[in-house]
Amino acid sequence: ELKVEQNPLFLSMQEGKNYTIYCNYSTTSDRLYWYRQDPGKSLESLFVLLSNGAVKQEGRLMASLDTKARLSTLHITAAVHDLSATYFCAVDMDSNYQLIWGAGTKLIIKP
Amino acid sequence: ETGVTQTPRHLVMGMTNKKSLKCEQHLGHNAMYWYKQSAKKPLELMFVYSLEERVENNSVPSRFSPECPNSSHLFLHLHTLQPEDSALYLCASSHPPPLAGAPDTQYFGPGTRLTVL
């Protein structure tokens, strides 16, 4: 059974600090997605990582993928309050339509 | 309207009611999805339509019935629901995955918050 585990599930941090969210998955997959969800709002695509060693950056967020370790990380640099949200990772299955989702990491950044 | 829209945004219904959720996408996509998002649970894929044909049905109870009349519209018909069906129902759309390729990025609507009494 394909499982996707995010760690931590909840994170409260101060502005200006750095932190990393981890996404582990249990079977081989070369494709991983990161999404953001603000309270009461929908999911917004952040990154698509399509190969081993892929790294993508947007502003203070940087995502990477290690398919051999079955691990993706989402690194937050010098956090700001606007990054407070729930972050989800998702891994594709062979069916090509189905993504298996992590439970989400709720991130609260205090001013 | 742009992106993916869903109506209604909030719905309260009794267990004997029949209601429908509507999703519309304005992105030119050909694949549409229904997801269920419950508190403290991973997102659950319910149904997938590609080119108006159902391609995935993840053992969803028959009290949920999807309909995709065209590539821009997706419905979820609800009847005799249970309180445990209360959740946020999200619609998404994407381009169909290429052969031997990955699912394309999915774009989500704002969701319908459903409460079953």
Image: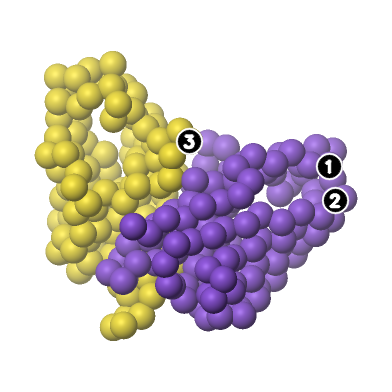
Chain colours: A purple, B yellow
Say if B73 sits above or below A73 in the image.
Answer: above
Label 3: how many residues lie within 10 Å, few (<14), some (14-19) or many (20+)? Answer: few
Provide the chain ID for the residue under circle 2: A
Are labels 3 and 2 assigned to the same chain? no
Which residue is disc 1 drawn over?
A14
Give the residue type that dot 1 points to.
Gln
User: From the viewer's perspective, is A39 left or right of A62?
Assistant: left
Q: Compared with residue B22, is residue A67 higher up or lower down, i.e. above or below?
A: below
The residue drawn where x is 80% and y is 51% is A79
- Check disc 3 and give the amino acid type: Lys
**Residues marked 3 and 2 touching at CB (< 8 Å):** no
Q: Residue at x 29, y 59 (%)?
A: B32
Per the model, the C-alpha gap separating discs 2 and 1 is 6 Å
Residue B21 in the image, given as x and y percentages of width and height: 26, 39
Q: Secondary structure at mark 2?
A: loop
* Residue B93 horizontal/vertical position (percent): 35, 60
Query: Quick one: SS at disc 3?
Result: loop
Q: Which one is in front, B25 or B97?
A: B97
Residue A44 placement, left or right of B110: right
**Numbered circle sitting on residue B40:** 3
Q: Chain of mark 3?
A: B
Quadrant (top left/top right/bottom left/bottom right) for the C terminus of chain B: top left
> Share a chain, discs 3 and 1?
no
The residue shown at (31%, 66%) is A97
Q: Amino acid at mark 2?
A: Lys
Discs 2, 1 touching: Cβ within 8 Å: yes
